[in-house]
Amino acid sequence: MSYRAPIKDISFVLNELLDHEQLAKLPGFEDYSAELARSVLEEAARFAEDVLAPLNRSGDEEGARWTPEGVFTPKGFKAAYQQFVEGGWPQLGAEAEYGGQGVPRVLGTGVQEMWAAANLAFKLCPMLTQGAIEALELTGTPQQKQMFLPKMVRGDWTGTMCLTEPQAGSDLAQIRTRAVREGDHYRLFGQKIFITWGEHDYTDNIIHMVLGRIDGSPAGVRGISLFVVPKVLVNADGSLGGRNEVKCLKIEEKLGIHASPTCVMQFGEQQGAVAYLIGEPNRGLEYMFIMMNAARLSVGLEGYAVSERAFQQALGWAQDRVQGKPPVENTTGKPLPIAHHPDVRRMLLTMKSATEAMRALALYAALQLDLASHSPDEAVRGNAQARADVLIPIVKAWCTEVGIEIASLGVQVHGGMGFVEETGAAQYYRDVRITTIYEGTTGIQSNDLIGRKIGRDRGTAMSALIADAARELQGADAKPAAEGIGLLREGTESLLRALAEQPDRAFAVSVPYLKLAGVTLGGWLMAKAGAKAAAALAKGGGDREFLEGKVRTARFYADNLLPQAHALARIVRNGAASVIETDPALL
Ligand SMILES: Cc1cc2nc3c(=O)[nH]c(=O)nc-3n(C[C@H](O)[C@H](O)[C@H](O)COP(=O)(O)OP(=O)(O)OC[C@H]3O[C@@H](n4cnc5c(N)ncnc54)[C@H](O)[C@@H]3O)c2cc1C
């Protein structure tokens, strides 16, 4: 089943819900316009549909391959990457100073959705390169920037993020990779595991951003520094020198994203890998977290990108597969395609409306990042950053958790043919499963949301968001959405009380609280979308089929998905005691 990029819905969110053309008033975005966004989206759609999507299945079947000489990507991937570079795609979000196009993040998010839906394994390499670029832009010295950025922005070299070690997963305080000073650089010794695209055959150099501990640094998170470590050393004139002591020992066998090599990387077997300190010593984790905001948003979008693809696949199947006589609307007396069965239609509507809600919320979060980085008004910048900080763990964890449910529904719509590999539905389910784990698990995102993002400012940023949503829903014909936002307000108050009185109670319900936030904020945006679509229909304008579809998904979301908020709010209120009063020894 081929993939069709959902340009209409992405454009609808940008134009109708976010008024994205407001960005053109901000310094640095003067050239931005709806037409520019549309043409970038159309171009990206062509690349995603024609080049990346056809490689998704074969990439899954063949997988990346480790050899003593290096890691080889599946047939067609290297050529697709070259086309990606020739098309200028790596430059899209990077700063103009190093050859980037500097388009707003909200547009970049729309584009990345297409890469992720078309071929999740492929998408991870540019995503991590972008993360490494942002870390260098933020904290690199002018020489470091000059040495690495132009090539990385052009896509000539790719980048990685090397955090995880066997004993240091969610708990990065346990990092042991050692850094020993040697003149103007350091020598690094240590092993990193699970490094995405740590080795491959795309480019002649790979730039690793590595967390390590300088000898003599304090223990724990305050003693971690960030280093840039090239696979091949770079001479002063920019040409490539000798091989650095960086080696991929093996790649993992895994459930999904088979075309993406997940590498065990050895830094420094003898002399140590040459490494350059980024920014100040012992501030590595802080820098990594700044860069991870964008990476977390990008992983969040993977949840709904795969949902979109799973939905398209399931819809096509349900329109073709003839089975049984639906109880209603069947005047022929003959069996009909399964899309006519109410339960199959319910599954398809769940898939479509949840995907639209997640997309709207993620693009809304991305817009906040654009306002935070480009508004000339300090207060606007501060408020937008605080709102983005609250939203990003929600987008990361909620969209990926729901993404797994949607991909699972996609399998269900196919019946037995969903469980066998032939249709592709199973691959989406396997591929999306990682998204709730990497870049911080759902548990870690929820802790971040209630601890750092809500606890620290005593709910100020979250309350402002709730107040804005409630105000927008006032007077609108959107009772379930307004009720949902009311439940989120009560849930936030109950959470803040728990945080103040007995924090472990709050942490026991942090995931249900995060999901409550996701489902209700999604409900707010879906209600707005439905109202906008209905208004456009009443005026007689626009794409009627699309607008009528939107009115229906908005209504379905309100009637069938938003009621989850009642259950989640009840868990947030009452669920903690049974968790914290159960000793693990009793399990
Ligand atoms: C395919 C793949 C690609 C990856 N790519 C990269 C990469 O490019 N770079 C990189 O550095 N890493 C990468 N990772 C590693 C990934 O980020 C970690 O697997 C992830 O952070 C979780 O760490 P862990 O596996 O050690 O699980 P653990 O930390 O052991 O967690 C196990 C469980 O315990 C829970 N848990 C742990 N601590 C807490 C806590 N404080 N509160 C509540 N619950 C908690 C978790 O939520 C989880 O459910 C990748 C992993 C995979 C599988």
Image (cartoon, rainbow, N blue to C red):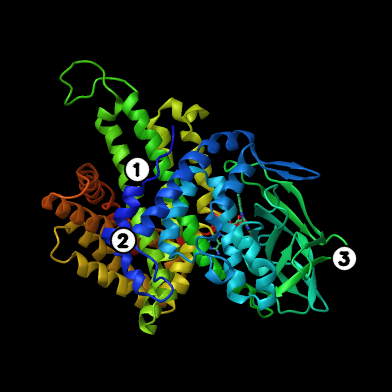
Residue 494 seen by the camera: no
Residue 238 seen by the camera: yes
N-terminal of the pair, mark 1 or mark 3, is 3
Q: Position of residue 146 (x, y in %)?
A: 67, 72
Residue 344 located left or right of residue 201: left
- Residue pointed to by mark 1: 351
- Residue pointed to by mark 2: 521
Whole-angstrom CA distance, mark 2 to mark 1, is 17 Å
Residue 543 located left or right of residue 432: left
Q: Position of residue 362 (x, y in %)?
A: 39, 59
- Residue pointed to by mark 3: 271
Mark 2 Cα shell of 10 Å, populated few (<14), some (14-19), many (≥20):
many
> Is residue 581 placed above or below 253 in the rendered structure?
below
Q: Position of residue 54 (x, y in %)?
A: 52, 36
Q: Name which residue type carries label 3.
A: Gln
| Residue furthest right in the image | 270
For image coordinates 64% across by 74% down, the residue present is 284
